[in-house]
Amino acid sequence: MKLKFINLIFAAVTLLFSTNVFAAETIKIGALFAVTGPAAFLGEPERNSAKMVVDEINKAGGVKGHKLELVVYDTTGDATKAVQLATKLIKDDKVIAIIGPSTTGETMAVIPVAEKGQVPLISCSAGSKITDPVKKWVFKTAQNDSLAVGKIYEYLQKSKQTKVSILTVSDGFGASGREQLKSQAAKYGITIVSDETYGPKDTDMTAQLTKIRGSNSQAVICWGTNPGPALVAKNAKQLGIKIPLFMSHGVSSKKFIELAGDASEGIKLPSGKVVVADMLPAAEKQKKSLMAFVKDYSKHYKAEGDHFGGHAWDAVMLIRNAVENGALTAAAIRDQIESTKSFAGIGGSFNYSQADHAGLGKDAFVLVEVKNKDWSIVK
Amino acid sequence: MQLDQILQYTLSGLSTGAIYALIGIGFSIIYNATGIINFAQGEFVMLGGLFTLTGLQLLHLPLWASVPFSITATTVIGILFERLAIRPLRQPTPLNLVIITIGCSILIRGLAMLFWGKDTHAIQSFSGDNPIAIGGATILPQHIWILVVTLIIIAINKFYFYHTISGKAMRACSYNRRAAGLVGIDVRRMVLFSFIISSAMGAVAGIIVAPLTMTAYDVGVMLGLKGFCAAIIGGMSSGISTVIGGLILGVLESLGAGLISSGYKDAIAFIILLLILFIRPQGLFGKADSERV
């Protein structure tokens, strides 16, 4: 009897230990997002989405028994801070991959740290110079500006509107868009007849638009993030500008329609597929991921999931998939991400390779139009 | 066509200029009563817009009730600002005061960010969005609101400063605080009054401009700076010269953006500010070396 009892205890203790021995170690992922500061509109949904997807993965038992742990730091949109925090993530937190930062400037600053620390960095910002030229440890999930520009130009070329005016915001996003708009124009047979800019804090763009109205352009392309483009839309309506108005993917959220009100009707813009997730055909590869993301996000945060959050979602999923394929070290995760093929995420269908660390093609964008205060896909 | 364009630039410029003028007068009133340049003036503008939003969306008040609600709420903040940050100061040197107002502006902005979030918010126009054509140019009904409200406020100001006892007392403070105190004017009360008036005016500016420019926790910075420019051009007078200063600034900005390059729009404002400070520090209309009126 006594022996039996001891046996039982022995068995229990062995069991206790064995679970300890066999329990897979936690995978630590670092994240740098601009949760506050001027780029908070990027950082906040990114942090929310990353947290959400990590929680969901852990709730479902982790990846092959490994739980994920997300260490998030707020860079406030400051490149210096981003560098310090990246070093901290690598040296102190010993993460095996870093997601973020949110803006191109921060990412460019953090790249040397990640390269030196030999930790894969999956940036959530759009600048094409992040992965051009390709850097061994650096990937990105946000669509290149050049793809968005191409999408608009393709449409303009098809509808034979070849004289365009551009109106870009004088910050990093606008400058990068302006560069792409100007450099790609010739390829699509488009001439830029008027090249205007506005300040990120400007409250009235009628002067620029009056000038554009006076030119012989057939379309206006405005490149900026809220609230500027909403003001442009309102001002254009005030001035009675009849030529079609195009916006960038920087405003592809319901917030833009809310801000611009009636003035947003008929505006076209390239957008990640997330805003039109429910309108996509069932055969669309991304549809499953998109619907899951949109549903989860609104359940967790009572807000609409946007494509900024999607960049973080994609980044976490890339790491998750790498771990599932057996990668447990920074180097193995890097190799796995590089060999990712046709991963249908939020930003698009990702195909990474040794020569391409951006992973997305033109199909990452759809051209959408505002109709009856909602998005619709332009065929 | 060219003439149409110039008309449009001028009209756009006048309507933005009217806003700069309102904010500029807020700066001047406090400056004249206290010698402080209140760098938190822009935040009153921001609060005006955002409190209106609260009235409309959170409390579901109609617009005519949201406006006084917003003005009252902003004025209360103006009073608290004076009571908690300006009055307790032991050594009110100009530098201390300026730094305190900058600190407060950052504080107010931060609190507003926590309370209203980081998003930009739209507010409905007072009377529709149908453009009104004037010659070849167009303006919105809201622009007329802005011009009319600015005119009314300036008229009220004029009346207050020249035809009421407390307005005259405030002017006395601006001539010479010590002498005003000696003849029995409660200078500290006048300081409080100046904060009440300028926070209320800031709120009004924020309310009438919000339907056009939308509003967010950080709109006060740039508007405040432009208002400050207007006040400098007007020589820190709380009367018509600051109004003209604001209008000049608005029109030049708009013409500059249209005829030269939109990239230089803000630069134009600040170049004017520097030129005025270098060449005519007493303002465009002030007499050199005379006491400020």
Image: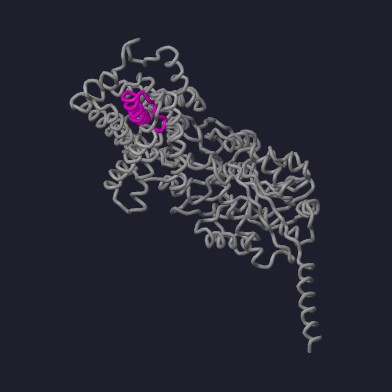
Which is more toward the observer, A185 or B27? B27
Give the answer, above or below, for where B105 lies relative to B25.
below
Q: How many marks?
A: 0
Residue extending furthest toward the top: B288
The reply to whether the magenta stretch includes residue B36 is yes
Q: Could one spot residue A189 in this view of the protein? A: no
- Magenta run includes residue B120: no
Residue at 37 percent of width and 41 percent of height: B49
Given residues A256 and B280, the one toward you in this image is: B280
Residue name at image x 30 percent, y 44 percent: B67
Q: Quadrant of residue A319?
A: bottom right
**In the figure, residue A238 lies in which quadrant?**
top left
* Residue B240 % position (x, y): 29, 22
Q: Residue furthest bottom?
A: A1
**Picture quadrant of residue B48:** top left
Residue B254 screen position, x and y as percent:
42, 26
**Percent position of residue A348, x then y:** 65, 53
Q: Could you tell whether A377 is left or right of A125 in the image?
A: left
Query: In the picture provided, is A303 more to the left or to the right than A157?
Result: left
Residue A196 in sight in this render: yes
Region in magenta:
B16-41
